[in-house]
Image (cartoon, helix red, strand yellow):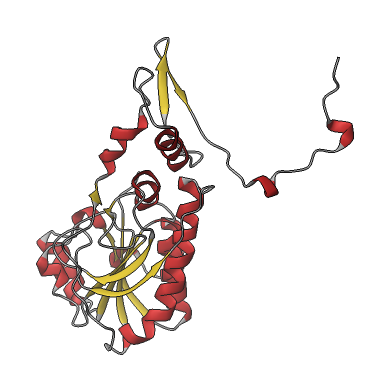
Amino acid sequence: MRVFYLGNNRLGWQVLNWLKDEGEQIVALALHPEGRRKFAKRMIAASGLTSEHIFDASQLNRRSTLRAIANLKPDIAVSVLLGYILRPELLDLPPAGCINVHPALLPYNAGAHPNVWSIVQGTPAGVTIHYMDESIDTGDLIAQSPVPVEPVDTGETLHHKLERAALALFQQTWPSIRRQTARRVAQPTAHGTCHRVDHLRQIDEIDLDRTYRAGELIDILRARTFPPYPGAYFRLGGRKIHMRLDLCYEEDLPTPETKDEPHEN
């Protein structure tokens, strides 16, 4: 297929690589602008495209950009972790539609940072492939796969679990998408959650004068543990003190060697 690919981050690069290995033709690539893009150099190299076929995702709704993409005659658009809403003019361009890979079990955790909110709010975690519409992660469902959240998961470990599950689900689902035989099921509207990037400010600062339940505080701290990102913090003496949790099951604790054990006085 002639694919217009819109991607960011490691998962965006992994899906693009896989499509190329499958022999699909990437006719255009959209990337986040400088300063927001991740794994861009690897995606550009994998795509094999020259600069005139690589677009700034923040400019996709411009008429000149739409014309340039239309001239490339893509059969389908594939979006992976793109942080922009697409206009109907772009969504309607590819005959086979625009599909999105989202690391959440929609309708839960549409939008940003689903790995954080599944831990903090206890919502189901998973991955979804869906058709795109004008709203944020609300289009018809193609395929989903749940991902368990363990008590020792952090924002980092859950992110990587979702990443692996999303790639596997895309690989399983692509043949039916390519044949245009994939199912199309409307998302339920009675439940669900959606978050913006700036919603993290609601949980990042730990108020030393507030009462937290122990489980609530642990969930915030582990959800925001994702080095090298700063994560949750408290203020003391005019300074921010950042916190990270290191979690493991008891049976996974390392056994100290006798020679390394502290000596009692």
> How many marks can you see?
0
Q: Which quadrant would residue 108 be assigned to in this image?
A: bottom left
Q: Is residue 53 above or below residue 159?
A: below
Which residue appears at 44% of the width and 32% of the height? Answer: 214
Which residue appears at 28% of the width and 63% of the height? Answer: 106
Residue sticking out furthest to the right: 259
Q: Is residue 164 above or below residue 110?
A: below
- Viewer-proximal residue, 239 or 58? 239
In the image, 193: left or right of 62?
right
Locate the C terminus by quadrant: top right
- Residue 25, horizontal then vertical, whole percent: 36, 80
Locate the N terminus by quadrant: bottom left
- Residue 46, horizontal then vertical, whole percent: 45, 68
In the image, 95: left or right of 83?
left
- Residue 262, horizontal then vertical, whole percent: 82, 25
- Residue 89, horizontal then vertical, whole percent: 10, 68
In the image, 48: left or right of 86?
right
Residue sticking out furthest to the top: 237
Q: Which quadrant would residue 234 be assigned to in this image?
A: top left
Which residue appears at 37% of the width and 60% of the height? Answer: 103
Which residue appears at 86% of the width and 22% of the height? Answer: 263
- Viewer-proximal residue, 260 or 179? 260
Q: Is residue 263 above or below residue 93?
A: above
